Image: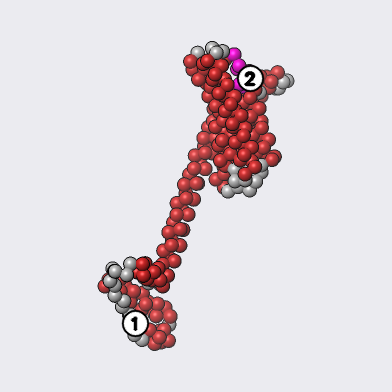
Amino acid sequence: RLCATAEYFAIFFAPIALFFFLAELKEKKLPRMIYQTIACLFTGNCIANCILHFGLNDHIINRENQMYALLAASLVLVLIMEAFIFREKQNFVIRIIRFGTVLSIVLFLTKFFMNYIRRANLPEGVYFLLEKINFGSIAITTFTISLVCALYFKFQKTIEDQIRKEQTEYMAYHDSLTGLYNRNYAEEWFDQLDMHKEKEYAIFFLDADNLKNANDSYGHKTGDQLIQTTGCIIRSVFP
């Protein structure tokens, strides 16, 4: 009885988590607010059932039909909104989660309506196959796989974005040929020195002799090699 009660409460809480989760996936304000409002309504329903169960000793099992009806209605509502109303352009990660969510809902609804499917005049082989399939487990597995895949791609994209950000920041303050700090870095460094005039510093002016002759005589590739060698020498002296 305890396990059954816990399962019923889990089913009452499921729509709340589902709608808040879907709300977080939405970029536009209107669909996010609609999902959040529906989640709040289910939250109120769950609180009312907790009061009835724990406060008034009206066991939650007595409202089993209402529970399944609300859950089925919420799943149908999500299916309609995701398939026909809120079909906004989304990134690849969100599309994976959305596909897994919709497919899981379809499987859950199939499980809920199995009693009606049994009454239909289906061929014996089809009926036997439907009886053997555990639609609930498949739905949970499908949603879990889609969520894991989405998290993997999200993690991968986050790493790639971080690498690109670091590369962009590096190129903004370093010379692409030598790897030495460039003019942007020098200007910011001088601005900081202006705010801390008590600090002492020295400025060196360096020049590579015959660079133009190297470019004219041996080509710009040789000139670039000369600049890179000069940069290596500078880094060895001023690490």
Badge 1 element? loop
> Mark 2: which secondary structure?
helix
Quick check: 80 above or below 231? above
State left or right for residue 215 relative to residue 113.
left
Q: Earlier in the sequence, mark 1 or mark 2?
A: 2
Answer above or below: position of 131 versus 20. Answer: above
User: Residue placed at 57% from the left, 20% from the top?
Assistant: 49
Left or right: residue 83 compared with residue 178: right
Q: Is residue 221 magenta?
A: no
* Residue 87 % position (x, y): 66, 43
Near mark 2 (Cα within 10 A), the count class, few <14, some 14-19 or many ≥20, is few
* Quadrant in the picture for residue 230: bottom left
Residue 166 seen: yes
Residue at the spot x=68%, y=22% of the render?
117
Amino acid type at image mark 2 = Gln
The answer to whether 197 is drawn above or below residue 221 in the figure is: above
Please name the amino acid that badge 1 sits on: Asp
Task: Provide the residue designation for mark 2.
Answer: 66
Whether tag 1 and tag 2 are in contact, CB under 8 A, the answer is no
In this view of the protein, which residue sits in the foreground, 74 or 128?
A: 74
User: Which is more toward the observer, 148 or 20?
Assistant: 20
Q: Which residue is mark 1?
A: 207
Q: Is residue 67 magenta?
A: yes
Please report the bounds of the magenta region as a residue range: 62-68
Vertical comparison of 72 with 170: above or below: above
Q: CA distance from mark 1 to mark 2?
A: 84 Å
